[in-house]
Amino acid sequence: MSDLDPKPNPSDRNPVAMSERPSLSLRRSDRRRRQRQQRHQTRAAKPRQIPLSRAVLLGLLLGLTIVGSGLVAAAMLFKLPDEANCRTLFLPTTTAARRLYCARTYADRNTVESLLEAIDLVDELPADHALRPEVDRQLELWAEAILDLAETDFQAGDLEQAVATAERIPLSAMPDAIRNRLAIVIADRVKGWQGIWDEATKIAAAIERELDRLYWGPAFQQVTRLLGIGNRYWETTRYQEYAKAIQLGRQDSSKVERARGIAARDDVDSVLEAIKLVQEIGLASPLRLRAQTLLRQFGQQLIDIADRQLEADDLPGAIATARKVPSVTGLKPKANDFVVLARARYTARRPTATNLEAAIAQARAIEFNSPIYGEAQDWIARWQDGLGQVAILERARTLASSGQTEDLRLAIATAREIPTNNALWERAESEIDRWSVQLDTEQDRPILARARELANQGELEAAIATASQIQATRPLYDEAQRQIVQWQGSIARQGDTPTLARARGLADSGNIDAAIAAAQEITYDSLLYDEAQAAIGDWIGQTLDREELDEAYELASYGTAEGFDAAIRTASGISSGSYLAEEGARAIELWSRSLLSIATERANTDLLTAIDIARRPTANHQLGSADPRQCQSIIPPFA
C-alpha cells in the first residue's frame, strides 16, 4: 500500500482489504471475541433483579447503542477512497481494486476526458489478473460511452468534434476481441456521420443557390429534404433558419423592387427614400448582400447627382446632396471628400493663377486612402499644367487687345499652343473663336465698304461681284448678302418697272388683253414678278366682270320680267372691288324698278302673277322684304 493512501480503520470490513491484512490481526480479533463471550457468560451466571421500568429503559438504550454501532461499523466497513484521494494515487503501489474503483469514479462524470482518464487508469492491468474480466467489460462500456458523447456532438452539429472524439478512443488499450469489434463500430459510425453530413451539405448548397436566385419555391422544396436526414442539428436548427430566411426573402424581395422603382426617379429625395426602405432588410435575410450592394449603388447615385449639380455650376446644391449620403451606404467618406474636391473644381472654373493654386491646395487635402484620391490627383495634375498655360493665354490676350489684324493672328496662334486636354483649353477656345470673328470682320470690312462705294456710283453689277467675295463662313456674310439682294432688286426694277407701267397704261385705256400680255413679260426671278401677277389677276377679273355685265345688258334688252330677273342675277356676280361694280349697281337698280313696273301693270289683269313678280328678290332689290303687304302700295285694290 502507498503511504499516500488513507489509514485503514480497525473496524473496516472490506473483503478485499481484509484479504490483504496480516494474520496477527485475525488472532487478536478472535481473542477479543472470546473475552466478550466469557464476560457475557459470567453475567448470565449471576442474574440480577431489575425493576420492570428500569429494565425497559435499559433495553431501549442497549438497542439504540447496538444499532448505532452497527451503522458505524457498516459505514466504516464499506468506506472507499473519494475522488480527491484518487487524484493522489501513487500508481506503482496502488492496488487493482483501488484503480478500478477510482476509474469508475472518473467514468461516472460521463465526460470524454473523465472516461479517457478511467481507461488510462486500468489499461495496464495484466491479462491474467483476477479483475481483468471486469476491467475489460468496463473498458468496452467506457469506449461506447465516449462514442455516445461523440454522437451527441454530431447531433448538435459539430461533425469535426464528433470525429475527433471518436478517434480519441484508445483501442490499443482494449483486448483484441473488443478492439476489433469497437474498430468496426467506430468506423461505421464515423462513415455514417460523414455520409449524413455530406448529404446535408449538398442540400444546403442547393438551398443557397436557389436563395441567391431568389427562387423561394424551389428553395423551400430543398429545405424540406432536411427533415428526417438523421441529424438533429440539420433537422431543427438549420431547417428553421432556412425556413425563416425564405419567409424573410419573400418579404424583402418586394422591398428591393420598390426601392429600385423609387430610386429610378433619380432625384435626391427619391434616392434617400429608397435607401431608407432597403435599410429595413436585416442581416438574417437572404437578400442582405444584395441590400448592401443596393445601398452602395444608391449612395453612388447621390454622388452622381451631386456631380451633375456641380457641372451645372450649382456648388451649394452639390455640397448639400453629397452631405446627405448616409453612412449605411459605406460611401460617407467618399461623399465628404467629394465636397472638398467640388470646392476645388468650382474654384478652378475661372482658371487664373490664383484660382488654380487655391484649387490645388484644396484638392491636396484629400488623403491617400480616400476612394477619390486618384481622381483628385488627376485634377491636381491638370491644374498644375494649367498654371503654365495661364501665362500663354494672358500673353495672347495682350496681343489681341490692339485689335490689329496681325496682332489678332498672332494672338490666335499663341492661344492654340494650349493643349486641348488642359483645363484652360475651354477658355482659350472661347477666346480664339472671338478673336477669329474679330479678325475675319477686320479683313472683310474693306471689301464690303468697296462694294457699297460702287453701288453708290451706280455700278450695281460691280458692287454685287465685290460683295460676293465674302464667304459664307465669315461674320459679314449675312450683311453682304442683304446688300446684294437690295442691289439685285434695284437692277430688276430698272428693267421691269417700265414694262409694268406700260401694262397698267394699257389696262387703264381698256385694252385689258394687251395689258395682261405686257405684264407677263416680267419673269418669275424679277422682284416685280409678284406685283405683275397681282395686276394680271385684277385685269382678268375685270374682263370676267365685263363679260357678265354685257350678258346682263343683253338679257335686260328683252324687256320682260324674266329678262330683267336674269339680268339682275347675272350682274350681281360682279366683284365689289371691280371698276365695273358701280356701273353694275346702277343697272341692277334700274332693272329692279322696271321689274316692279311690270308687276304694277299686271296687277290690273293678273293679280297673282303681279304678286309673284313683286315677291321676287330681284324685284325687291330696293324694297327689301317681299311680303305681299309691302306690295299694297304698288298693287291697286279691286273695283
Image (cartoon, helix red, strand yellow):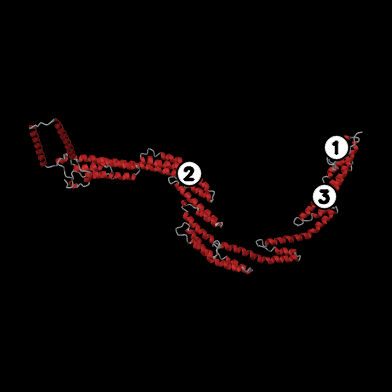
CB under 8 Å between discs 2 and 1: no
State which quadrant residue 454 falls in: bottom right
Reading the image, the residue beneath label 2 is: 253
Q: CA distance from mark 2 to mark 1?
A: 92 Å
Which of the two discs, 3 and 2, sits closer to the camera?
A: 2
- Count neighbours of disc 2 (C-alpha within 10 A) and say few if under 14, some if 14 to 19, many if 20 or more: some
- Crowd tier of the residue under label 1, counting other residues whose Cα lies within 10 Å: few below 14, some 14–19, many 20 or above: few
Q: Nearer the viewer, residue 391 or 536?
A: 391
Residue 119 placed where, x, y %? 24, 44
- Relative to 225, 603 lies left or right: right
The quadrant in which residue 54 appears is: top left
Which three-letter amino acid code belongs to the residue tagged 2?
Ser
State the SS at label 2. Answer: helix
> Residue 302, position in %: x, y?
51, 52
Front residue of this view, candidates 376 and 85: 85
Decide: is 496 above or below 242: below
Q: Quadrant of the N terminus?
A: top left
Residue 578 badge: 3
The mark lying in front, picked from 3 and 1, is: 1
Which residue matches tag 1? 629
Which labelled disc corresponds to residue 617?
A: none
Marks 3 and 2, Cα distance to the nearest angstrom? 84 Å
In this image, 636 relative to 298: left or right? right
Residue at x 51% of width, y 64% of height: 357
| Residue neighbourhood size for the residue with mark 3, other residues' Cα within 10 Å, grouped as few (<14), some (14–19), many (≥20) | some
